[in-house]
Amino acid sequence: MPFAVHMELDSYSAAELQPIVEHVERISPSARTPRRLNIEPHISLAVYDGLDPEPLIKALDQFSDGMRSPVVRLSSLGLFPGSAPVLFAAPVVSAELLALHRDFHTAIDSAGAACWSYYLPGNWVPHVTLGEQLTLEEAGAAISGAMGLWQPMSASLHRISLVAFHPVELLWHRQLPA
C-alpha cells in the first residue's frame, strides 16, 4: 500500500477549486478527484511504497513542530501527459516552496523510507491534483472547460498529513497556525 505526505489547502481555496473538480467529474465518470477520494485538495511532498509509518510519524512530528502555514500562489493549470493524464493547479515555484520541500526530505531521511523519484528534490513538480486517470479525450475536455473556470489564487497550506491510499486513510496530521 502506498503512503503520501501532503499539505492541504485551506477550506476557502479548496472551495474555489470545486467548480473545476465538478467539471472533471461531469466529463469523466471514472476520474479520481479529491472529492471522489474524500480528501482535501493538497500538494504532496512525498509518496512512498510500503513502509513502517511509525518512524515517519516521529520524523513528521519533529519536522512540523513550530511550523506555520505556508502560503502559495496557484497561478496556472496544467496536464501531466501519458496514458492516463492528470489535470492540476500549479503553484508558483518559489524559493520558499523549494526550501520547504528540501527541508522536509532532509528531516525525513532519518525515517528510512524510499520516496518515489518524482517527489525527490530536483525532480518534484509541485501541483494540486484536480483530476487523474483521465482518458486522452477527457483530458482535452477537462483542460478546455477548466480554463473558463480558472482564477489564480493564494492558498494557505494549513495542515500536513500522512495518508495511506487507495482507499485514503488518514494516519497522522498536524494543523498549522497561520
Image (spheres, rainbow, N blue to C red):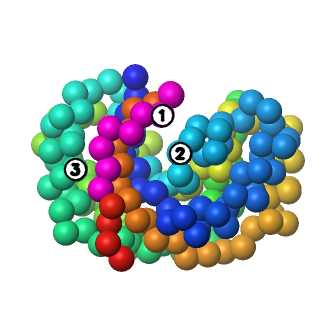
Name the chief secondary structure element in magenta: strand
The answer to whether residue 3 is visible is yes
How dense is the environment of label 2, judged by Cα within 10 Å: few (below 14), some, or many (20 and up)?
A: some
Taking the magenta stretch, the answer to whether it contains residue 66 is no
Which residue is located at x 55 percent, y 54 percent? 41
Instruction: Give SS at disc 1.
Output: loop
Quarter occupied by the C terminus = bottom left
Earlier residue among tags 1 and 2: 2
**Tag on residue 82?**
none
Instruction: Give SS at disc 2.
Output: loop
Quarter occupied by the N terminus = top left
Q: Name the residue under label 3.
A: 60
Picture coordinates of residue 64 (x, y %)?
Answer: 23, 60
Q: State the CA–CA distance, disc 2 to disc 3.
A: 19 Å
Depth order, front residue of 47/40: 40
Instruction: Give SS at disc 3.
Output: helix
Q: State the CA–CA distance, disc 1 to disc 2.
A: 8 Å
Mark 2 or 3: in front is 2
Residue 28 located left or right of residue 95: right
- In which quarter of the view is residue 14 placed? bottom right
**Tag on residue 39?**
2
Earlier residue among tags 2 and 3: 2
Picture coordinates of residue 94 (x, y %)?
Answer: 44, 73
Q: Which residues make up the magenta segment?
A: 166-174
Which residue is located at x 51 percent, y 28 percent? 167
